[in-house]
Image (tube, rainbow, N blue to C red):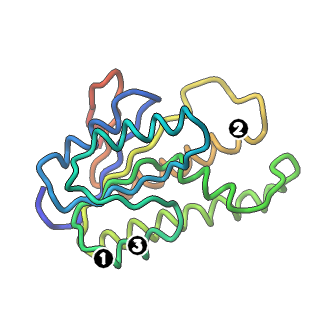
Amino acid sequence: MGHESKIILITGGARSGKSEFAESLLKDEKEVLYIATANITDDEMKNRIEKHRERRPKAWNTYEGSYNLDKVLYKRSEKYILLDCVTVMITNLMFQENIDYDKISSDKLEDLLNKIKKEFEKLIYSAIENKKQLIMVTNEVGYGVVPAYKLGRIFRDFAGSINKFIAFISDEVYLVTCGIPLKIK
């Protein structure tokens, strides 16, 4: 893949093959930092995380977290960064704040969206500045029904806005469906 900076976004539905496709793009690389944003919250998530760990090459390094990732990139020597996944990171950033989402004002909601967007902006520009290739995996959550609860609608809207923002900046964007990647940018 070379050593100039490059930003790639991979989107798709649940279990569509997004992570496998992202990993396949880096299969021959040794200098890979895998940023895992998921937290173990129950047995199902524990099993899901274990499957991801088992599938990754042993030579890859892993960083687990969702906060201040731009600072992580400045400290790391790996040239290839795989972040899995954007939507889990959005969730983590949303719940970092002690917010009553049923009573939040539209101004506070806009402020929070901008704060979350800024985290992704700092991460992307850190990758560009440090000449790293950043691949981000995200979920396409806007194709389904409108969520019944306000928090679900807020999350869906945040994910759509952040995905659109990242796609605009990205050099390449792929949609993965049924295990088949389609390059859309």
* Quadrant of the image occupied by residue 174: top left
Query: How far apart in space, not on screen, are marks 3 and 2 (Cα)?
Result: 30 Å
Residue at 42% from the left image edge and 27% from the top image edge: 15
| Label 3: how many Cα within 10 Å (few below 14, some 14–19, many 20+) | some
Q: Is residue 62 above or below residue 11?
A: below
Nearer the camera: disc 1 or disc 3: 3
Quadrant of the image containing the C terminus: top left
Q: Position of residue 3 (x, y in %)?
A: 14, 66
Which one is nearer the viewer's eye here, 33 or 106? 33
What residue is shown with label 3? 72
Disc 1 element: helix
Q: Which residue is the site of mark 2? A: 152
Nearer-N-terminus badge (1/3): 3
At a point 38% along the width and 58% down the height, the residue shown is 169
The residue at 30%/51% (across/down) is: 8
Judging depth in this view, the residue of 117 and 49 nearest the camera is: 49
- Amino acid of disc 3: Val
Residue 129: image tag: 1
Q: Is residue 6 visible?
A: no
